[in-house]
Image (cartoon, rainbow, N blue to C red):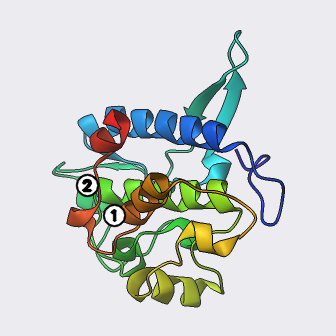
Amino acid sequence: LRTFVHPNGALMPLARSVAIAMQIADVLVAAHAIGLVHRDLKPENVFLETNRDGTDRVVVVDFGLAYIEDRADASRMTKEGVIAGTPIYMSPEQCAGKNIGTPADVYALGCMLYEMTCGFVPFEGASFQLLVKHSFEDPVPPGQRRNDIYIPRALEELILEMLRKAPDTRPTAEMLSAR
């Protein structure tokens, strides 16, 4: 996906971006159903294959930071106070080094969809600045980042819901998949 999503580059058609995001949401539904949290969802970890009909087939890779929620030995794989992930796409709870769950993946997908729709990530800066911004700043709505593109209000609202600071106020992957 990184090949098609890069700063200040040409944007993919909006319908394609949404279709890709929906397939990623479907992958998250399956992963979250077994308690699997990816923790490092980003364009570099999403491969696009082409189906025979020319449509995209999404493959989510690199589960190196993933862990299973509610597993007795999960604490060996992730400790509170340890920050793991890619700062540009990290949820506020990841930035704080707190125990994280499936809402962190939804937040990362929100960052990716934000980037796919307007060509910018929600927050920019050095790693420490990103941690602070993800934790305390509200993102500028993606439609305000570029005045030369149209982003439907419902899509912009969904993206901002996915980027809410409180994990329990974000939609679940199942909710995204059902939209």
Nearer to me, 114 or 135: 114
Q: Residue 87 appears in which quarter of the rendering?
A: bottom right
* Residue 86 visible, this angle: no
- Give the answer, above or below, for where 121 lies relative to 179: below
Write the residue at 19% across / 48% down.
Answer: 71
Circle 1: is it few (<14), some (14-19), or many (20+) Cα within 10 Å? some
Q: Circle 2 sits on which residue?
A: 74
Nearer to me, 151 or 170: 151
Give the quarter of the figure containing the C terminus: top left
* Residue 62 visible, this angle: yes
Percent position of residue 59, x then y:
58, 32
Percent position of residue 79, x then y:
31, 70
Nearer to me, 116 or 13: 13
Q: Amino acid at mark 2?
A: Ala
Question: Secondary structure under badge 2?
Answer: helix
Would residue 25 be found to the left or right of residue 68 on screen? Answer: right
Q: Amino acid at mark 1?
A: Thr
Evaluate if marks 2 and 1 touch, with contact meaning CB atoms under 8 Å apart. yes
Q: Which mark, by number, is residue 78? A: 1
Would residue 90 be found to the left or right of residue 121 on screen? Answer: left
Give the CA separation, mark 2 to mark 1: 7 Å
Question: Secondary structure under badge 1?
Answer: loop
